[in-house]
Amino acid sequence: MPTEEAPAFLLASAHRRTSHVPVWFMRQAGRSLPEYRKLRGKGSILDVIRSPEIAAEMTLQPVRRYGVDAAILYSDIMVPPAAIGYGVEVTQGHGPYVPLPFRSPADLGRLRALEPEVDIPFVIEAVKHVAGELRHIGVPLIGFAGGPFTVASYLIEGGSSRDYTRTKSLMRSDPTVFAELLSRLGTLALDFLKAQVSAGAGAVQIFDSWAGILSTGEYKNHVLPSLTALMDGLASLRVPRIYFAVSASHLLDLVASSGCDVISIDWRMSLSAARKQLESRDMHQALQGNLDPTCCLAPWEVLEKEAIATLEEGQGIGHIFNLGHGVLPDTDPAMLERLVELIHSVPLDTLVDRTSDDQ
Amino acid sequence: MPTEEAPAFLLASAHRRTSHVPVWFMRQAGRSLPEYRKLRGKGSILDVIRSPEIAAEMTLQPVRRYGVDAAILYSDIMVPPAAIGYGVEVTQGHGPYVPLPFRSPADLGRLRALEPEVDIPFVIEAVKHVAGELRHIGVPLIGFAGGPFTVASYLIEGGSSRDYTRTKSLMRSDPTVFAELLSRLGTLALDFLKAQVSAGAGAVQIFDSWAGILSTGEYKNHVLPSLTALMDGLASLRVPRIYFAVSASHLLDLVASSGCDVISIDWRMSLSAARKQLESRDMHQALQGNLDPTCCLAPWEVLEKEAIATLEEGQGIGHIFNLGHGVLPDTDPAMLERLVELIHSVPLDTLVDRTSDDQ
């Protein structure tokens, strides 16, 4: 396939020149969309995900409305542990709830291997449906999984947490069991992602949202091994591997060393500072991000100014425009529509730093 | 006064050699102490602070129990706006509540100048009392104030916030009013701190806890001017000026450029990485921190190992041992007692990097 016809999202992931900076939004499928709220109902999020037609429709809604350069599967990071019977519920607005949290080494036995055809046929069906629809318009579907650390934190805490006291306690007091837990969750994520790619996903994103609560040393010793193994396992799939964590500027070098292809950063550190730091270590991942989602609640003039500043920081090549975290539920979809138009309207040549142009 | 007799806390703040690394804990006066809970009752925190005898006693309790190298005034960052009649309540466990938040430029008129003798005689009395007691044992008292940004966020949001949407909205949509608000809050903090130093405080700490939610560019443009003005205003007092923010690794260079003498960092970035980064910019602030407070909930062997690792990262000179955030309410005071003993027992010579030894 000639370069010009490959989707901009995939080209940018590979640090190659595109006609425009590709754009999609974390949580683009979700509560900010009236068509989503209409479909959603009040039940468990996991029940919605178990209905492949509904999950597929929710995945496609933002592609139709916004014309974004990538779809992301409507799913949840707790789907794999729920699917193997760990006992997980996910309620709207309250996040995951694990009635019987991970409390002792014996709980490792509750983490059996994923059998995709048996455990997550609904995910495979949803991905196939979405990928089939998107093929006609050349938009890739991003499959996703939670990072082993973030999923572990929910299993250990029993739900959301403020200080992650139990998670850190296990990590420090019994690093062997902690490592085994993360290793198993890494394998679970790998099998989950492989199933999505087999069914048609053209990229994967690891949401390790809460990894930024760890110190650099803890992340290196306790999280990076399972993450690197996950990235290694994904390598043979030959799809872009994106990694995302919030408030993780201090982890940038380590994240890059995991082997991921794209690093999604929040708004705290600028894209240009991140790129400069990576290049000084001779690392050249593409970057995804990083507009503060609260900017989308501002008047258009403010949003426009901030979005253009983000594009300029991204320097055109090897940049996938996104928010620094998920779309806030109060966001007006009309603002995101306008934002996509804006991103698509800015010619790449005005963004590329001529001194480092790769053409 | 000969160097040997100056308090270790003050020497370390000035990057001078001490016999041992000084140690104190953010929120050392507070809910983790049974003697505090006995005194505290159920009323408003601001009412407790308005009783100078009780505030003084609460300030002294951890000095007696732990033998820490510094006391910190029992107070709250919302005392100054409350004292000038802005309308602020602070409830245990829920933080500040501002019934009539900052909503328009007209609300700037609600921020009059502080008249310490009239508005905060109770603070002055508490400081005098504590400083008098501590003089005998050579332990300095740290006065404190909230950072202009963090206090502004409470005034604008009306209380605690998850996304700081309103604060960021005002900052981006009306930067002139936002700058004026922070400038006034900076002056308020300056007058509040001057009153504390006049009454006997030997150091000051600016708690700008939530500044880390901002991007580097936003912090530089919207927060640093008022912070630098505050540091400049404090310079003539000739006491160490400590600055603290959570999750602010990305702001380190900018914080250092504010003119503060000591940078208190959380546990995310290591002390050695922070020092290396500062030195590469030819900046030489002392560092305070940065043990993860959840370590104090771990078995002693874990806490001991982590504390020694923190000491080693601190490299002995120009390091004030502290936690990376406040003492968690569930912390067993016996662990903190043991921790202070440990920090005091490690000879400085075992920590100082010989290649960069200043002696």
Image (tube, coloured by chain):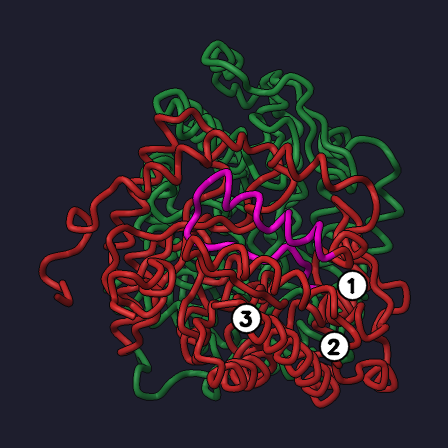
Chain colours: A red, B green
Magenta region: A52-77
Distance from label 3 to label 2 (Cα)? 38 Å
Q: Which residue is mark 1?
A: B331
On screen, residue B260 above or below A333: below
Q: Amino acid at mark 1?
A: Thr
Q: Chain of mark 2?
A: A
Q: Which residue is mark 3?
A: A215
Whether residue A56 appears in this view of the structure is: yes
Q: What is the number of the mark on residue A117?
A: 2
Distance from label 1 to label 3 (Cα)? 20 Å
> Could you tell whether B131 is left or right of B89 in the image?
left
Have a look at marks 3 and 2 and say if they share a chain: yes
Q: Amino acid at mark 3?
A: Ser
Which residue lies at the image location 40% right of the left edge and 24% below the top edge?
A: B173
**Secondary structure category for the residue under label 2:** helix
> Could you tell whether B117 is left or right of B241 in the image?
right
Answer whether residue A317 is magenta in the image: no
User: Residue B136, image x and y in percent?
Assistant: 62, 55
User: Residue B128, image x and y in percent?
Assistant: 61, 38
On screen, residue B110 above or below A96: above
